[in-house]
Image: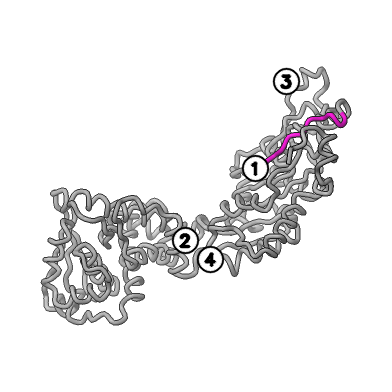
Amino acid sequence: MTKARTLGELKRTYPLEKLRRSVKDEARENLIAKLRAGERLFPGIQSYDDSVIPSLVNAILARHNFILLGLRGQAKSRILRQLTELLDDEVPALPTEIRDNPLFPLSAEAKRLLEEAGDDAPIVWIPRSERYVEKLATPDTTVADILGDIDPIKAAKRGTGLADLEAVHYGLLPRANRGIFGINEVADLAPKVQVALFNILQEGDVQIRGYPVRLELDVWIAFTANPQDYTARGKIVTPLKDRIGSEIRTHYPRTLEEGLSITRQEAWVARAEGMYIPAYVAEASEAVAFVAREDKRVDKTSGVSQRLSISLLELVASNAERRALLAGERPVARPLDLYAALPAITGKIELEYEGELQGAERVAKDLLQKAFGLAYGERARGLQVDEIVQYFADGNLLTLPEGSAKAVLKEMEKVPGLIAAARKLEPQTTPEALVAAGEFILEGLAGRRKIARGEESYSAPLERERERWGSGN
């Protein structure tokens, strides 16, 4: 259908009841249609189906402004950006700074345009992707950034005083009129800015440079914040908190399977031909975040982002790719690759005082050991490892080079029962896959304190680091 280009055409061809809806009513109606059709809401958002999403649906049905409370890496910003999927494909608007509703103009510019042009006033169409405005709150954010300020140049051009509404340069919030305004980390805003926000939420009043401006904006406002800051003892102004309709708590994945599903969805690992990441290696990689969230040396108030797991798995794949290029083998991820991916861990954990004393790298290696122990516990059923443990208890040592898989496999064959256990764990029988399985068994036993693990450094390109295994006693 041809889009209306003037107000007169719009009145003849467009359902005017749609223009009488608020943006919250629009989202509510589209949400109801999706629920009736059985469509999946918020695609790509996992582990929230029975927790966050039901609460979010309730808030939308109630036409609430809401806040997502959670630690970093819990998909809060992604949820906000997907709210646009609940809006119409396009909406008509007047070509003004705040995209006025043609039937209910707010700005002085829109009112003048309708007075001068009437039904000949031009109409523009705003796609839903342009109806979302986001601001990352910082302490230096001003009221002018959010609401606007007097523009002396505009006032001079019109030859009017500063009280003229057409001399206002609108901020982010008015420019989100008839759309969604997302504010990340709202508690970081200065109290003065928070007060301006709750005036908008409750009364629709705006004060710009001391001039009271009545702007009944049609905006759906959604916030995010860290729970630590979002308290009366934190940095939130209580009246603003009182005016937010729903408080929705987000969370990290509750099981290893949920976390791994998210990581596999997000991580870029399909980059080399024949790349193979065994399930137990991926599980050990995912387990790092789980054990870090429980470790007393890691700051709980900062959280451990899901991005740690994603970056870690990507670096594991990269080290497997690097080794395969140097050795001329198929790229197969091995447990040793997690140690080469330490930068993904050290860059994403905030340490408490005890952890800082030990150092980020030492803490990261300890987390890896615990992660291998956790992942091994999930896979250990049916594996016969008594011979392996006894071999090291008898005082024997095993040193594994980072070189070719065949060379590593040859060393592993010295340990009774290790290759047999690896074959039971790993469905593939190539040397690369069996080495990965054997390393995982050794790492798992070390994580369970059955044997001990050490490292030695070498200068050869393929032997920068060797694993040394011995008795755990």
Q: Residues within 10 Å of mark 1 (few under 14, many from 20)?
A: some
| Disc ID at residue 314 | none
Which comes sooner in the sequence, label 3 or label 1?
1
Magenta part of the chain: 118-128
Looking at the rendered structure, the number of numbered marks drawn on it comes to 4
| Three-letter amino acid code at the position of disc 2 | Ile
In reply to whether residue 127 is colored magenta, the answer given is yes
Instruction: Look at the numbered disc 3 and give the secondary structure of its residue.
Output: helix
- The correct choice, above or below, for 160 with respect to 296 in the image is above
- The correct choice, above or below, for 89 with respect to 454 in the image is above
Instruction: Look at the numbered disc 1 and give the secondary structure of its residue.
Output: strand
Which is in the foreground here, disc 2 or disc 1?
2
- Left/right of residue 400 with respect to residue 315 in the rendered view: left
The residue singled out by tag 2 in the image is: 262
Q: CA distance from mark 2 to mark 1?
A: 26 Å
- Left/right of residue 341 with respect to residue 467 in the rendered view: right
Q: CA distance from mark 3 to mark 4?
A: 52 Å
| Three-letter amino acid code at the position of disc 4 | Ser
Q: CA distance from mark 4 to mark 1?
A: 26 Å
| Three-letter amino acid code at the position of disc 1 | Val
Which comes sooner in the sequence, label 2 or label 1?
1
Q: Is residue 345 visible?
A: no
Dots 3, 4 in contact, CB < 8 A: no
Instruction: Look at the numbered disc 4 and give the secondary structure of its residue.
Output: loop
| Three-letter amino acid code at the position of disc 3 | Ile
Instruction: Look at the numbered disc 2 and give the secondary structure of its residue.
Output: helix
Q: CA distance from mark 3 to mark 2?
A: 51 Å
